[in-house]
């Protein structure tokens, strides 16, 4: 479905990013795993190459908050492959104080985390869009969240040490509208921009949280990364050629 495509995944060494990389190479595309963690990225690549001996996958260092890093990435890929078909904005940088409860969040930390994530997505998208305009086509996919769509269900965090960070809600809701803004701004340039809003991903959360979370879903509860990849592949493929400026919610009904 994605044969001969060259696709970049930011944050490709993470839980969701590595699943995205797997889906891309299993659909016969070339995957560029872009991340700040080289050691972890190489481990992911070695694992994928063991599973897919003919996998086409490369590592490229990328700091999504550095214009020079982004431009260097684009230049390196263009030099080797002569094209880039899509960029998947999946990275999630945050500072050491991220994740505090609302009244404990310092203003400087709030601003820094918004800039690191939403600002980074803007910067990556801007530089890739410039490349896509010159190339004559392109595809940008932003990874958002259910909490960019609805207000937090704070009650599911009771009796845990977890919370739903205010920065996360602002970032993910802003990202959905940035997606719509860019898709319209790029009108006439053959560039598609869409987002995927994920439900919660299973990642060793406490059982009390998992039980409360599941009450809001229709079947499964928390999702696995493999539950998201079909939607990603669809958005990367020509099967979604005229899907533009949309936010697709994959959450087992959590937002209903």
Image (cartoon, grey):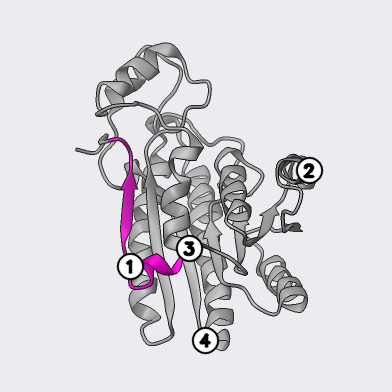
Foreground: disc 3 or disc 4: 3
Q: Is residue 12 left or right of residue 102?
A: right
73 relative to 242 in the view: left or right: right
The tag earlier along the polypeptide, 4 or 2, is 2
Q: Which residue is mark 3?
A: 236
Q: Residues within 10 Å of mark 4 (few under 14, many from 20)?
A: few
Q: Which residues are magenta?
A: 236-252
Q: Name the residue that disc number 4 marks.
A: 136
Dot 3 or dot 4: first in sequence order is 4
The reply to whether callout 1 and callout 3 are in contact (CB within 8 Å) is no
Of the residues under marks 1 and 2, which one precedes in the sequence? 2
Q: CA distance from mark 1 to mark 2?
A: 35 Å
Q: Tell me which label, 4 or 1, sits earlier in the chain.
A: 4
Q: Nearer the viewer, mark 4 or mark 2?
A: 2
Q: In the drawing, what numbered circle is on residue 46? A: 2
Give the secondary structure at mark 2: helix
Nearer the observer, 79 or 92:
79
Mark 4–mark 2 Cα distance, whole angstroms, equals 34 Å
Residue at the (49%, 33%) spot, across then down: 99
Q: Residue 66, located in which quarter of the rendered image? A: bottom right
Say how many tags the image has: 4
Is residue 11 at all visible to an observer of this figure?
A: no
Q: Which residue is mark 1?
A: 245
Q: Residue sitting at 52 percent across and 26 percent down? A: 203
What number is the disc on residue 228? none
Query: Up-down: is 176 above or below 210?
Result: below
Residue 167 spot, x, y in % from top left = 43, 43
**Label 2: how many Cα within 10 Å (few below 14, some 14–19, many 20+):** some
Q: Where does residue 9 sit, x and y in percent of width and height?
A: 60, 56
């Amino acid at each position: 479905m994605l044969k001969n495509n060259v696709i970049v995944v930011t944050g490709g060494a993470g839980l969701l990013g590595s699943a995205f990389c797997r889906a891309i190479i299993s659909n016969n595309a070339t995957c560029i795993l872009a991340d700040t963690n080289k050691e972890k990225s190489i481990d992911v690549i070695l694992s994928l190459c063991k599973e897919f001996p003919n996998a086409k996958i490369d590592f490229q260092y990328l700091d999504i908050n550095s214009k020079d890093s982004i431009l260097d990435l684009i230049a390196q890929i263009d030099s080797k492959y002569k094209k880039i078909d899509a960029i998947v904005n999946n990275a999630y940088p945050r500072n050491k104080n991220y994740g505090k409860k609302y009244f404990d969040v310092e203003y400087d930390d709030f601003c820094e985390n918004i800039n690191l994530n939403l600002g980074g997505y803007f910067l990556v998208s801007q530089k890739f869009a410039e490349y896509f305009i010159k190339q004559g086509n392109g595809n940008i996919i932003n990874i958002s969240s259910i909490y960019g769509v609805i207000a937090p269900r704070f009650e599911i965090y009771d009796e845990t040490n977890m919370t739903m960070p205010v920065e996360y809600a602002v970032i993910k809701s802003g990202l959905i509208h940035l997606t719509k803004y860019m898709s319209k701004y790029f009108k006439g340039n053959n560039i598609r921009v869409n987002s995927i809003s994920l439900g919660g991903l299973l990642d060793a959360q406490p059982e009390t949280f998992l039980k409360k979370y599941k009450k809001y879903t229709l079947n499964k509860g928390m999702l696995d990364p493999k539950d998201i990849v079909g939607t990603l592949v669809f958005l990367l493929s020509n099967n979604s050629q005229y899907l533009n400026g949309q936010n697709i919610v994959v959450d087992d009904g959590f937002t209903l």
